[in-house]
Image: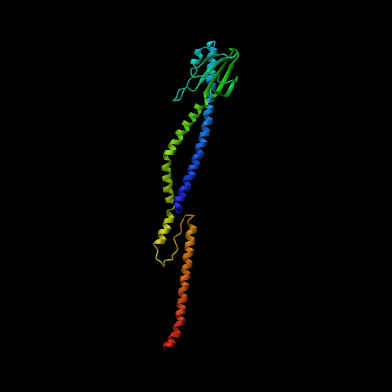
Amino acid sequence: MTSLRARLFLILVATTGVIWLAATIWIYLGTKRELEHVLDTRLQEAARMVASLVRDDGGAGGAAIAAAPQVANGYQRQLSCQIWSLDGHLVAASSSAPAERLTEAAEGFSSSLVAGEPWRVYAIEDAARGVRVLVGDRLGLRDRLVQDLVRGLVAPALLILPLLAGLIWLCVGRGLAPLKGIAADLKGRAADDLAPLPPRDIDELRPLTEALNGLFGRLDAARRHERAVTAFAAHELRTPLAGIRT
């Protein structure tokens, strides 16, 4: 590639793209971690709410499950609740819950595979009532939440990427303007004009101007030396020619 402007443009665009990609990955991982924490907290709250409703109801009726929080925000219902007796019988379940037991864990968080689909489940065991409350959501829905959130952040960035590339192109051109100024100065000079270039306040151009001024100085010295030699030779030849003419 022969264009310095195009080379700098590609370098800057590639660097910006790499940084942007790294930032996107970082946002994705951080968002997923924070979202999982929030959703796990929601599982705990939902399980405790259902367990408290079971205690208040004096049993594990269907009304307790109906009162469990359900979330419908463009996705399918995310939370599924089950109440199992400690002897292994399903007492009640929400409409979105699968037929299989959500988890075999007695208490706390666990991950399980239900009907070939991964789930995140929180369990609370109430020994006094003889029931175990299970509340879970599908991990696939969590991934969709993260993807939609990251997509909402990345989409505007992709839309302004052409604008960013245009600004980089203009800024690179403006940064290289002093080089064009030097080229215009040299192009407009006469062949015998060996005056030094005006000093530049740009650190990267100072060595170039100093090298060119040094070259001009050496050429001027060589030209003066050549004129002196020519004048001396003309003077030395003038006397023999005058004698021959005489």
Can residue 108 be seen here? yes
Q: Please give the count of numbered marks on the rendered protein.
A: 0
Can residue 42 be seen here? no
Q: Which residue is pictured at 42% across the width and 40% down the height?
A: 160
Residue, far front: 116
Q: Give the quarter of the figure containing the C terminus.
A: bottom left
Q: Position of residue 51 (x, y in %)?
A: 55, 16
Left or right: where does residue 132 sit relative to residue 13? right
Please tell me whether residue 118 is drawn above or below residue 132 in the rendered image: below
Residue, far bottom: 246
Q: Position of residue 149 (x, y in %)?
A: 47, 31
Q: Which residue is pictured at 47% across the width and 33% down the height?
A: 150
Residue, far top: 58
Q: Position of residue 45 (x, y in %)?
A: 53, 21
Q: Position of residue 208 (x, y in %)?
A: 48, 59
Please tell me whether residue 195 is drawn above or below residue 92 in the rendered image: below
Please tell me whether residue 70 is drawn above or below residue 185 in the rendered image: above
Left or right: where does residue 135 sit relative to residue 191? right
Please tell me whether residue 227 is drawn above or below residue 26 in the rendered image: below
Q: Quadrant of residue 75?
A: top left
Q: Which residue is pictured at 46% across the width and 73% down the height?
A: 226
Q: How is the image coloured?
A: rainbow
Left or right: where does residue 103 sit relative to residue 95? right
